[in-house]
Amino acid sequence: MPQDQANFQQLLQSSFPIIIVHTHDEKRVVDVLRNVVSTSFHHGPLYVWSAHSGLETSLEKPVSEWRIIGREEQAEKPEKNTTAPEDALRHIKTHINSGVVLLPDFHAYLTNPSVVRMVKEIAQDYARKPVTLVLVSHAFKVPPELQRLCAHFDISVPDSKKIRQILNDEVREWRKSNNDKKVKTDKKTLELLINNLIGLTESDSRRLIRGAIYDDSVITHSDVKEIMQAKYQMISGNGALGFEYDTASFADVGGFENLRDWLELRKSFFLDEGSLQDIDVPRGILMVGVQGCGKSLAAKSVAGSWGVPLLKFDFGALFNKYIGESEKNIREALKSAELLAPCVLWVDEIEKAISGGNDQTGTSQRILGTLLTWMSENQSRVFLVATSNNIEGLPPELIRKGRIDEIFFVDLPDKKARHEIFELHLGKRKLNLSSDCISALVDATDGFSGAEIEQAVVASRYRAHAAREEVSRGHVLAEIGQTHPLSVVRQEAIQALRHWAEGRTVRA
Ligand SMILES: Nc1ncnc2c1ncn2[C@@H]1O[C@H](COP(=O)(O)OP(=O)(O)OP(=O)(O)O)[C@@H](O)[C@H]1O
Ligand SMILES: [Mg+2]
């Protein structure tokens, strides 16, 4: 017997008069319940109510054949109508002696005292008339009067094996109605697709898979991207969590060799659910370093190279003006991130976040506490990437080992990295300079950050344009000569940063 079914059956046997199921997947609950009721007749018949058609009964028959009690009785007693929740409850109370009654979307009515009262009376009568009310909804606030009468049930979401099965089903269906034409895709894309569907309900997964196949019979990377977005839209709770549409790839980043290797080593463990059993899930990293050296870019590339959604924490949105709300917001945002797992959660300039906000109230301390607790308890595949360029603002609790896997220090780019950065930024703008020219530029930019190098390339184009010339080494060198790099302007701060980084961090 499938796990959900077995668990539900057990819950029914434990005689709770009310069972609450938090889910968007109503259909799945109906399926589970139908299976439970049809395999074991102890629980009596199953009734399903809806605001549209009132109370209906369902035994082993398919939905389309449900006998509609409301209507049937209407034939005899025309005044009988059970579409209104109070009428339905009254009917249950007086006419149903045993069974399971599914009440979808009932959260909306639990604000009505007379509805709450009737639910309570039915529940209190359970010993005499064993009727279990199953309330299904995505959003529930159980009124205190009912709390002690309720049990909660979590419907499981499909795992990767099940999603693969859904995918195969859908492909088969599609081929059946398309002269056995093949659905084009590749193994890597399929793995990404499956990974990104984890956390969604079965019916949502099915719908998204169907959408990906039916639009053009090819499953590509852009389908995966669309699925990531759709998933985010379905799940995202509050404004504190932003979906970053453009991730980067390490192909756009110069340097960061250690970080690349580090991530590559962990990629399969992070992505493959199965391998998690005996190895700890990678939790996250902190990148500390000199301004403009590519921390933000690298953070985006983590998501890009792992092929998972990138969520960015917006601390501005988190600091709600109502005290207490901001902790609730962070908790909700972290929860949404967990639902979107596997994903990368990016907290840019974390030191600002922590010392920011209206601190007279101690809000940022509490936010930090919430974040730290989450970090140490996090078992989901949410990989935290925090960036910072100011170590002074960083609380020691944050950088303690165990919370994050590694602290990477992002220093000014060395010769090799500068070469790569020049190649990248010249190439992006279709400027062809010989390798020798680039070497000369590299020698002239000792102490420059990636952003400063990029800026020199950008400005050289204006210079060349004004002189009506093609961009050459001379134009870039002239711009380099005019730049006062941060490493000179803020020499002491950078020295202090390096000093701090020694022994504490690994070079990115
Ligand atoms: N290593 C690099 N490779 C390629 N481009 C780089 C690199 N470092 C910086 N850049 C360029 O400079 C821009 C700014 O870099 P980025 O915002 O990632 O730096 P940062 O370290 O996050 O800076 P800050 O501390 O100010 O937030 C990037 O968008 C990119 O165009
Ligand atoms: Mg940045």
Image (cartoon, helix red, strand yellow):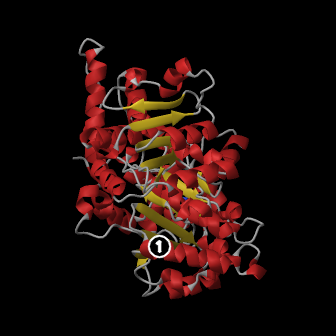
Answer left or right for 352 relative to 384: right
Q: Residue at x 60, y 20 (%)?
A: 78
Tell me if residue 429 comes above or below residue 491 in the rendering.
above
Residue at the far top in the pictured view: 179
Which of these two is toward me, 81 or 183?
Answer: 81
Which one is in front, 429 or 258?
258
In this rendering, the answer to whether 208 lies above or below 459 is above
Residue 366 percent across, percent down from the top left: 63, 78
Q: Relative to 332, is 69 on the left or the right?
A: left
Q: Is residue 440 visible?
A: no
Q: Secondary structure at mark 1?
A: helix
The answer to which quarter of the image holds residue 67 is top left
Image location of residue 212, percent across then percent down: 40, 29
User: Which residue appears at 69% of the width and 52% of the height?
Assistant: 113
Query: In x, y percent, where is residue 16?
Result: 42, 58
**Residue that label 1 marks:** 375
Is residue 217 placed above or below 464 in the rendered structure?
A: above
Q: Is residue 220 left or right of residue 331?
A: left
Q: Is mark 1 within 8 Å of ligand 2?
A: no
Towards the viewer: 479 or 132: 132
Which quadrant would residue 153 be assigned to in this image?
Answer: bottom left
Q: Is residue 264 above or below residue 28?
A: below
